Image: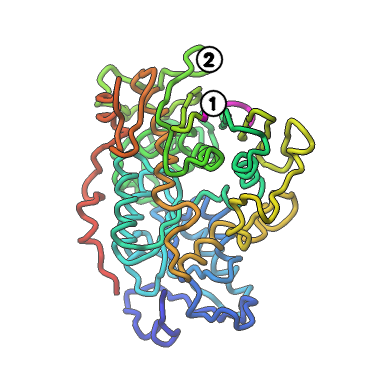
Amino acid sequence: MSSLTRRDFIKGLTAAAVAAPMTVPGSALGLDGAVSANERVAMGVVGCGSHSRTWNCPLMLQNKEQQIVAICDPDENHLNDVKNYVNSTYTKQTGTTYSVAAFKDFRDVVNRKDVDAIDVITPDHWHVLMSVYAMKAGKHVITEKPVLTIRQGQKLVQTQKETGKVLQVASEFRTFDVCQKVANLCRNKIIGELKNIKVLLPHGNRIRNNTDFNVRPIPPTLDYDLWSGPAPILPFMPGRLHINWRNHFSYAGGTLPDWGAHLINIAYWAANSDAQPPVKFSVNTDNPDTRYSIPGKTENIKDFPPADVAWTTAPNWDINAVFANGVKMRIWSDTTIGIKVEGTEGWYLSKWPFDKPEASSPEILNWEPGPNDIDVGRDLQYCMVSRVKGKGLPFAQKGGEHVHFSHCVKTGNVNTYYPAWLGFNTDVTGLTGNIMMVHDLPSLEWDAAAQKYVGENADVANSSFLFDRPQRDPYTFENIDSWINVG
């Protein structure tokens, strides 16, 4: 963490730097001297879109062990929105005018000497590249999920091991009391022997921002080349930019790996299989509601995704997976979002927003682990999030993921509740589902030791653009070392 005093920090600024943030005294944030200003984690925020404004920044601003000192975004409008929000919040909290450092380019944030950690809140195609760069530059990282390809997930895990930095994947569900209960019921065999897990995810490619799918001039407030980064430069369409980028394979994998990173991860937890993704996958071709033909698919898969198609990811799916221990998981798109665990002696269903769970009996519904029971959340009590309505920032009165992340940074604990290897293991399922649908494969087998697909259809899967793909120069892993200039 930074050991700079406010005087040292201001003294070290160059004339070209934007207005620097003042160090907020711990007492001003209600810390009563328990955590000094120099002990708080100085955060650099990369990405100022909707998830940054409505989730990550609010959590950091209410967490007394973090301070946002620098932000960046290639969209001027988004950058100014978050800048004004951070400045006004800290000014109100401290009674002293606050000015966060604001930049267009992510490298200006990562290379700041006063930044301890980076929060990567970007489209999926940036997650690993920025995280690897930040760790190599000496920063700890909390990053959104999922990874874009199998190979990128492997790169993230490798870099975390090599650098020894704290890397937490930003999936908050493991801090939720009700999600911990799903795992506890299974681990303690309250529902008997776990047999089946059903993961229900949102169906359809959602329009959440803009419906304009015409090619338009690039707005002067947007650096489209920087926003696109390692992805191909596609004709600019407002309808596949902010938020809706999730529906195009150039930038993401769609709802399956996106939402799946939350609930599939809880399924791994329940099956006691964090270290081992499912070994066998298949698609349920008998489900008429599942759409296997990806929009815009061409005969030559190497030309996919096409530049003239607004969205390319699958809107619906129905996938089976089998863990090495024999537990079966089915993942499909539905009007309900949630996870259901079924055992030999009962079942438990937790539906989004997780405030009204259901069970096969009152005993299962009301059961809570005792001191001698397995409790997967016992070590996470300090950052537990209750899903009771009306408490805190929505449902997050204890801060959840950011409280845990700052705690790990301050204690030097690289074993976060959702580290790089676990995030990647979870992403294998979503990516495998997409690979089967894009390439019309009925089944696949995953070899965790070899880190690749084996058996029938393996050649197609291991050569898929969802397994690996080139990055657009200069936004490549090979150029990262030339970007590092911390000082």
Would you say residue 353 is visible in this rendering? yes
The one of 451 and 252 positioned closer to us in this rendering: 451
Query: Image height check: is 379 above or below 16?
Result: above
User: Judging from the image, what secondary structure is the residue with disc 2 in?
Assistant: loop
- Image quarter hosting the N terminus: bottom left
Few, some or many residues within 10 Å of mark 2 (<14, 14–19, 20+): few
Query: Image height check: is 162 above or below 350?
Result: below
Residue at the image point whose x is 74% and y is 49% from the top: 389
Q: What amino acid type should be assigned to the residue bearing mark 1?
A: Trp
User: Is residue 297 covered in magenta?
Assistant: no
Indicate left or right for 371 with 482 as reference.
right
Q: Quadrant of residue 31 in the image?
A: bottom right
Q: Choose the circle earlier in sequence order: 1 or 2.
A: 2
Residue 483: x %, y % from top left: 24, 61
Q: Tell me whether circle 1 and circle 2 mark residues in contact (CB < 8 Å).
A: yes
Residue at the image point whose x is 48% and y is 65% from the top: 408
Q: How many marks?
A: 2
Indicate left or right for 5 with 381 as reference.
left
Residue at the image point whose x is 23% and y is 40% from the top: 470
The one of 97 and 169 positioned closer to us in this rendering: 169
Q: Which residue is mark 2?
A: 287
- Range covered by the magenta-colored residues: 327-337
Q: What amino acid type should be assigned to the residue bearing mark 2?
A: Asn
- Image quarter hosting the C terminus: bottom left
Few, some or many residues within 10 Å of mark 1 (<14, 14–19, 20+): many
Q: Which residue is mark 1?
A: 332
